[in-house]
Amino acid sequence: MKTILVTGFEPFLNHEDNPTRKIAAAIDGEVIGEYVVKAAVLPVTFSEAAGKVKEKIEETNPDAVMMLGLAAGRNRITPERVAINCNDGEVDNNGVKKQDEEIIEGGPAAYFSTLPIRTFVDRLTEAGIPAAISNTAGTYVCNNIMYQTLHYLKERDLSIPAGFIHVPASHQMALQKHGLASMSEEEMLRAVRLMIEAM
Amino acid sequence: MKTILVTGFEPFLNHEDNPTRKIAAAIDGEVIGEYVVKAAVLPVTFSEAAGKVKEKIEETNPDAVMMLGLAAGRNRITPERVAINCNDGEVDNNGVKKQDEEIIEGGPAAYFSTLPIRTFVDRLTEAGIPAAISNTAGTYVCNNIMYQTLHYLKERDLSIPAGFIHVPASHQMALQKHGLASMSEEEMLRAVRLMIEAM
Amino acid sequence: MKTILVTGFEPFLNHEDNPTRKIAAAIDGEVIGEYVVKAAVLPVTFSEAAGKVKEKIEETNPDAVMMLGLAAGRNRITPERVAINCNDGEVDNNGVKKQDEEIIEGGPAAYFSTLPIRTFVDRLTEAGIPAAISNTAGTYVCNNIMYQTLHYLKERDLSIPAGFIHVPASHQMALQKHGLASMSEEEMLRAVRLMIEAM
Amino acid sequence: MKTILVTGFEPFLNHEDNPTRKIAAAIDGEVIGEYVVKAAVLPVTFSEAAGKVKEKIEETNPDAVMMLGLAAGRNRITPERVAINCNDGEVDNNGVKKQDEEIIEGGPAAYFSTLPIRTFVDRLTEAGIPAAISNTAGTYVCNNIMYQTLHYLKERDLSIPAGFIHVPASHQMALQKHGLASMSEEEMLRAVRLMIEAM
């Protein structure tokens, strides 16, 4: 049996919750397709999040890494195509704010996801769940851990598939915020299971 | 047992489908809360839609009327607060286009919904389904049948609750159209059942 | 020479400014088309705003009334078609919050604008300024003063044209808030002058 | 006097016009800040656009390259941070459609803009024009020419600043399409001049 490391995030900014934390908790230990899931929940901080992913990789020695994050405002499941070597954006949960800063000094400008993102979108579409490839993971902590994880695997010549998937706000979050598109947590959970099955 | 007339619409404009047609078909004959459902699917035409609602009212002698329509672009269930005495907007399915025209010459400027719309929103919110009262049903065929139905009931002193509820695009519609917010048909169906139960 | 009363609003909610206040200040005393402008800036309160409009009507005895308000999020000039008999929404500048309340007990459900709103949209479009008729002025203080003013004029058999026009956020507001559509204050001012000319 | 090559695009997809074509035409030959402008209008085709930029570079031997493109739906001027090695998206003006294809086989995953994009945003903000750095130039012809131009300059060790800036739909385009955010062509032109001055 192969192992997949799945990560979610804690709440951040003014969001009261983070559906990816619940998804990670819900599938921890599950067997999905060819994989048994090892899950972790990450802090939303530039200084700690990627380190925690690397720790978990060393601890669980996974055959694949699927990182999950919240992109409030999107209305579908969006596997990310690429992570760029840039920290920028709002303050993180440590109150740290970055601007136009390299993640890894002198690192490559970007890494492409090595997850089968087109297959993911096709599989979700077949299952009736709105999905699309995204061409930007932003420049906040999500992009940071995607970039750093892909860089770490590259440096160690570990050719396991790894990448990042953004999910919309949950219905729970949208109940309080008019205008926010959303998806039910059940449906997001179903989407994550379908993607793991499709690997 | 009381009777509720529930109406949906056929597809219109460039939409390939209309989830309200399926919802109407799915709950026709069901017993929900205190009501047995009589469903009808309406043509999207200024000249025929309201007439068909009135026919169905005469035929089924209902204790309540819940009209459903599609508002592509919205991201939640939106019970409408008010219908206004105005036809305007895109061509209907007969190719007819109206502009700034009264629906009923000399009629009141507007009618408020007599469905318990605040209760609907509260009930859906409790159930985790995004919902909000909308203050405009537009000026297309949806608003037209809401206005005409409320006018018809008023004229005949029929004090049964009646009103209109817009639903978002279905996931099925959003699969083909990037950027379109959506809700699954299962969830919309659940929402409609919850609203009828809450009456 | 005829007189037009033009009103703007003070800032409200978390908006730092309100472009309609500046527009009102800018055109106060100007002669535009057949009108000399008398301008006023209103408090964003359910209890005072409409009273101040009525005072100004009594004081200036105008031949037309054009009320302006901010609709942050819209991307064009939107003359309102209709005001409805309902107070609802966020807290006003007095901290008062209304829900599903009639503005005038037993008043008509709605009043249509008596400004030439279609002419306004056509004139702005010719001039290259994005504009569209809006079918909802909301249920906040903007709708409140539109409804109350039209009711007041009706009650007194004053058949002068009156109505409400929403404008987008200003560029100044959008500079601080990513994602917010906006229009420059110069362009909004030009739009208001064009509408008065078109009356 | 230094030379800056500024490129715009022809109309594409279902857009009737392309404001970047007009901007390029308007500033061709102008002296702005330290630069004289040499402008070119490009075809929206995967096979020809980048070749035409390279030709123009060879022909004009510029000290800087600023490529402009339309991003309908955005509401501000968005200097692009990065171009990625990927062709994907809608059909181009030759009817060619790409999916998940490398632009340059084995090329780097991405190139960062070498224009002073933070300075551009600061300068535009000071001037009251909404602007923000964008983290995705998409995967269509815009991204394609940005990637290829930066790759070309890198391969030849030409260290001149080069990059891409997306502009919103013009008011002219928005007049016909309700819901589309827009900026006037005059304002976009002013923005482009301000950016060149700021280099």
Image (cartoon, coloured by chain):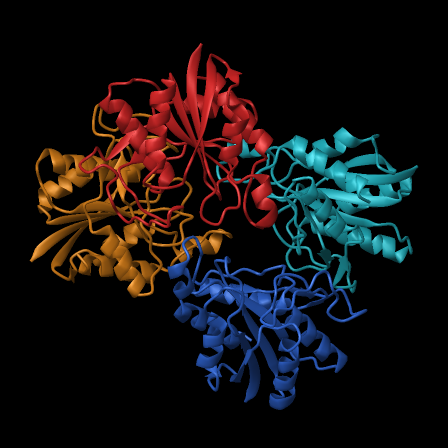
Chain colours: A orange, B blue, C cyan, D red
| Quadrant occupied by the C terminus of chain B | bottom right
Horizontal arrangement in the rendering, residue B42 relative to residue A135 (left or right): right
Q: How many marks?
A: 0
The percent position of residue C116, horizontal first and vertical second, equals 78, 51
Residue drawn where x is 52% and y is 21% of the image: D194
Q: Establish if A51 lies above or below B9.
A: above
Query: Residue B176 at x, y = what percent?
Result: 39, 60
Describe residue B90's horizontal placement relative to residue A180 as left or right. right
Image position of B4 with respect to B96: above or below: below
Where in the figure is residue A194, as x and y percent of width and height? 23, 61
Can residue A35 be seen by looking at this rendering?
yes
> In which quadrant of the rendered image does the N terminus of chain B lie?
bottom right
Determine the image quadrant of residue A80.
top left
> Which quarter of the picture shows residue C75?
top right
Q: Residue at x 33, y 37 (%)?
A: D144
Could you say which is closer to the camera, residue A71 or residue D65?
D65
Residue B119 percent coordinates (x, y): 56, 67
Which residue is nearer to you in this view: D187 or A25?
D187
Q: Residue furthest top?
A: D1
In depth, the one of B165 and B19 nearer the eye is: B19
**Residue in the foreground of this view, choosing between C97 and A74:** A74
**Residue at screen point 64% across, 85% down:** B55
Q: Is residue A63 above or below residue D170?
A: below
- Residue A26 appears in the rendering: no
